[in-house]
Amino acid sequence: MTAESFKQQYFSLHPKLYRVAYAIVKNMEDAEDIVQDTYYKLWNDREKLTDIHKPEAYCVTLVKHICLDFLRSPKALQNDNIVNYEFKDETVTIENKIVNEETVQQIKLYMNSLPEKQRQILYLRGFGECSLEEIETITGESSANVRVLLSRARNTLKTKLKY
């Protein structure tokens, strides 16, 4: 595989690969590093890539595995991978800002208490902006199961936020 054909086939996947990595590691810099590692591995194995029939699915799976390896690493344990919420509206009062920050902390707490698959699917859909098809590919779950898990996660959060 030539450098030009590699660029044409794999560089267009960058936004999707980044979204998948970010959805899993929840850190912009780490997600970008993971995508770069993915391209490095792809380039080193470029001669074998011609045998792959679904390059997009292969890349998403590769990113997922690299993310999981990263999350098990000591570097990931040093970082706080919780999503930071920033207020952009300068007209928000201090009282509202405190209430909003407390609500965000509650949502994070509730999300972390969800079962792993529900949390992952909710995060991919809500923050990763992934389509249901992309979530199916990332998680390996069926379309129906993705919808059920997403619905259960949302309903659990709604119920907990009402109290």
Image (tube, grey):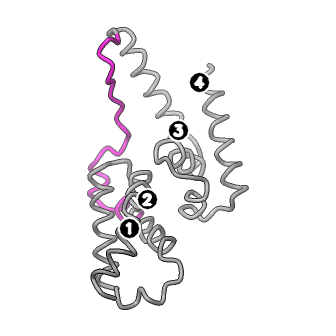
Q: CA distance from mark 1 to mark 4?
A: 34 Å
Tell me the magenta residue range. Answer: 68-92
Does 160 appear above or below 13? above
Amino acid on which disc 4 is placed:
Leu
Label 1 or label 4, whichever comes before in sequence order: 1
Crowdedness near tag 3: few (<14), some (14–19) or many (≥20) residues, C-alpha within 10 Å: many
Q: CA distance from mark 2 to mark 4?
A: 31 Å
Crowdedness near tag 2: few (<14), some (14–19) or many (≥20) residues, C-alpha within 10 Å: some
Q: Is residue 69 magenta?
A: yes
Label 3 or label 2, whichever comes before in sequence order: 2
Q: Position of residue 35 (x, y in %)?
A: 33, 64
Q: Which residue is mark 3?
A: 111
Residue 16 bears which disc, if any? 2
Does 133 appear above or below 50? above
Q: Position of residue 43 (x, y in %)?
A: 30, 80
Q: Which residue is mark 1?
A: 66
Using residue 51 as the reference point, say whether residue 3 is left or right of it. left
Which residue appears at 29% of the width and 69% of the height? 37
